[in-house]
Amino acid sequence: MEAIALPLNGLPKRLVDDGILEEDIARDAMSKSNETKTPFVSYLVQNALASSTDIAIAASTQFGTPVLDLSAFDAELFPRDIVDIKLVRKHHTIPLFKRENRLYVGLSDPTNLRALDELTFHTGISTQPILVEEDKLTHTIEQFLEKSEDQMIDLDGFDDADLEGLDISAVNEENDDQDDAAEVDETPIVRFINKVLLDAIKIGASDIHFEPYEKSYRVRFRTDGVLHERTRPPQNIAARITVRLKVMSQMDISERRVPQDGRIKLKLSRNRAIDFRVNTLPTLWGEKIVLRILDPTSAQMGIDSLGYEPDQKELFMKALHRPQGMILVTGPTGSGKTVSLYTGLNILNTDERNISTAEDPVEINLEGINQVNMNYKVGLDFSEALRAFLRQDPDIIMVGEIRDLATAEVAIKAAQTGHLVLSTLHTNSAAETLTRLSNMGVPAFNVATSVSLIIAQRLARKLCEHCKEPITIPDETLLEEGFREEDLTDLALYTAVGCDKCNNGYKGRVGIYEVVPISAKLGSIIMSNGNSIDIAEQAHKVEGYNDLRQSALLKIRQGITTLEEVNRVTKD
């Protein structure tokens, strides 16, 4: 059956009439561009059938549309905050400038009315086409997209309008590639959630809480370890917010009776992505959803930014570079144990070392380190992962947490057979860590000979440098709080005030550490079944290592934090 010839009209006819294309070539180009879903003008230029300049002049004559030389146009004038970059990529157009209530759009094919209609719909602004040459348009769009994405990397200082213009891709971690042909979703719920997520990243929040109640709905951020209310959207949109977050996390939206876990990856640019660990919990008035923000940059801060005192840093580094032994980091949930472990792993991460980690779950991906996610449904727990690691020629092993005797025994075996082991325990101090291992059933001899260093830690909020003010506290009170007589000389204390650059007088957090190496004397106390009081007295009073309280008071003397904040994080 003979194919039906496409009618020759519009721009193809003009190109034939002007002698730019042969008629049969024009018809073939129309057919091939339809088959490949490539714009007619793009097809001509890509296949060198006609020059961009000739096409632009012919189109201008045919449709009476002015031609602009993009090479002479100042790229800084592009209105980047008006048009979503997905639309730029999808329709192969470029926003040139806005004058009054009209947006002038550069395109190489003036018959591309769908692009103009969609830009008008999404921006709410009338559009006016301006012809540009196809090759220059392609080059300019690439620069426009690259510039727009690069600007997304640094979120500091962005106001609400800037944040609304960011290109956010929410994808599952198993499928990082976003379908560029997908329709741009601009519903109010999507924009609201995108705004909340970006605001949380901008201010450095660690968690986001979406909480439904009988007559209200609130969103709270945990910033510098403290929860505070951020916004109260209308209660009647609670279900839609929940559905949107569950879709982004690839959860079952029909299941509301049991908790679910998921993950969101926000691609802020080509070079930066933020992961969110998502959990839902059925409550009386709907599902509460908590998002833990996992920023990879937090694991790459460097040991100098964590708050170790010089002698504590030296002890940590010395233990890290031992060929074997066990380093234990302890503290309650949210005390920064994971960051301490990741910082140590980054220091050790070289081509000469084989490093494996068992985590529940893996929070931050580290290039060059073999990370294993626990899967209890199939029997993959910490002890099973550790046994597998020992058959994988390891140099360094990290265990997310020692929870039971089985895990402790395998970890200690690894530390005693030529491996460096890093792990965590939920205890309050170094001395309690040693007795906890003994209470688990680990023989005292194994504890004394395998553990090389214990770090107990807390995170305290740092005073804002812009608004902190001096304060006077009576010497009697300071002595009761643990200061020594010699500390009171030239002691400058500060209080939190609050300004537009901080959160109630605080900005950021600093680590407070108790770093205790296991000396021969401590080992003998452990093997003689000494209690935590005996161990603490030897470590602090005899060997002179600061406990958490003394380390915290030192941060006050340095003007970094307040007595109130220290009491919040270190007083039992």
Image (cartoon, rainbow, N blue to C red):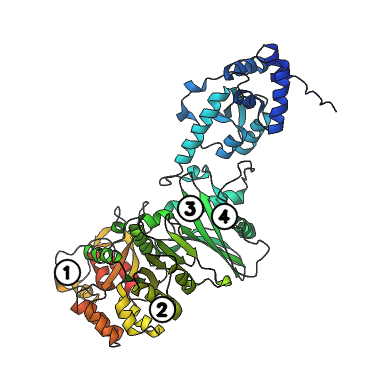
User: Mark 3, mark 2: which one is toward the viewer?
Assistant: 2
Instruction: Give the Cα separation between the discs numbered 2 and 4.
Output: 34 Å
User: Mark 2, mark 4: which one is toward the viewer?
Assistant: 2
Q: Secondary structure at mark 2?
A: helix
Give the mark, 1 or 4, whose residue is nearer the N terminus: 4
Instruction: Give the Cα separation between the discs numbered 1 and 4.
Output: 55 Å
Residue under pointer 4: 174
Does residue 264 lie above or below 423 as drawn?
above
Residue under pointer 1: 487
Tell me which amino acid carries mark 2.
Glu
Tell me which amino acid carries mark 3.
Ile
Give the mark, 4 or 3, whose residue is nearer the N terminus: 4
| Residue at left offset 43%, top offset 46% | 155
Displayed quadrant of residue 475: bottom left
Residue under pointer 3: 274
Q: Residues within 10 Å of mark 4 (few under 14, many from 20)?
A: few
Q: Position of residue 526 (x, y in %)?
A: 29, 84
